[in-house]
Image: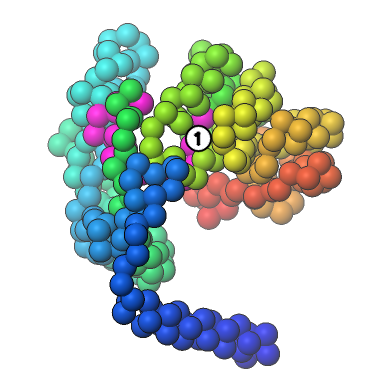
Amino acid sequence: MSISRRAERAFVEAAKLAWKSFQAVNTRLPEGKPFQPKWAPRPLLKSYERTRPPLGFPRETDSLCPTCVKEVRNAIIRGERDLQDLVTGHPGEIKAMLLEEDGKIIMRKTCEKHGTFEDVISIDPDFTRRIESLFPGRDFKTVGDELVHRHGSSNIKYGRGTVMTIDLTNRCNMMCNPCFMDANQVGYVHEPTLDDLKEILDRSISFKPRRQLALLFSGGEPTVAPTFLPIMRYATEIGYYANMAATNGIRFAQDPEFAFEAYDATLNTAYLQFDGVGNEANSHRHIGNLFDVKLQAIENLAKAGISITLVVTIVNGINN
């Protein structure tokens, strides 16, 4: 074992000992007056006041039939079903089992109409158990969100997500397969106006708890939307502390000045699509020099002061 690795392990053990010592003293002290930060609807919850869902394996959970969901979505697009059916009709909702089999965590579920589906959730059960063990318990119940969270069974009941994702457009300057948004392939353009987006953000800060106010702008490709720069400025004005963009990087590679404009508009981080090293590793994206484009985008983003997180899409048979 290297010296640095031994030092790291020693530091970890020392930190564990210090924490146990602190807890031994802390648990013997009388509880002080509960603290209530501005973002919370009431004083912070103690660990023993928090509830927890069932964890571990095996366990039952709620899920969706992927085929039912597609059928309902397409029927709504064709005008054969009402959009409200997604809220009140519970389409595709089924039970699923999370199981540990053959060194993996899998989800197995059966739809009466479309049969059984099985997905791999984790290839490292011990790591998954470790992550679940760190769950601190449910957050506050949301307060004042009646006009925001009207999503039927999918309603957020506790707290809020750490990052709010907003799709600025379903247009894109690439034609990838797979694409979770089916960008450029659905036969219509969905692109909220700046006023639409401002209304969404205004509603998002109208209820508590209100911590972790970070935004991820996505798409399609968010940088092709005319609202990309102005909506980031507005988000910062109303109190969002971090703006991020899920991007393929083409716009940033083509135009170095655009990276500086995005930085001035308060873009903090680019979640950059990056499927591997070399153009061959990116050939399934159907742009021959895409890796070179990524390198140029990284260079331009870095010069502008925007941090970069590389995001890999794992595709069976290509880079899995």
Residue at which label 1 appears: 165
Q: Nearer the viewer, residue 247 or 263?
A: 263
Q: Which residue is rendered at x = 25% and y = 58% of the image?
A: 49
Residue type beneath disc 1: Thr
At 29% across and 26% down in the image, what residue appears?
A: 146
In this orientation, which residue lies closer to the viewer: 161 or 279?
161
> Can see residue 158?
no
Q: Which residues are magenta?
A: 148-166
Q: Position of residue 14 (x, y in %)?
A: 52, 86
Vertical side of 280 occupied by 24: above or below: below
At horizontal 67% and vertical 89% (from top left) the residue drawn is: 2
Image position, residue 133 (x, y; %) = 34, 67
Which image quadrant is residue 158 in? top left
Q: Nearer the viewer, residue 277 or 35?
A: 35
Please tell me in which quadrant of the rendered image residue 287 appears. Answer: top right
Residue 8 to residue 233: above or below: below
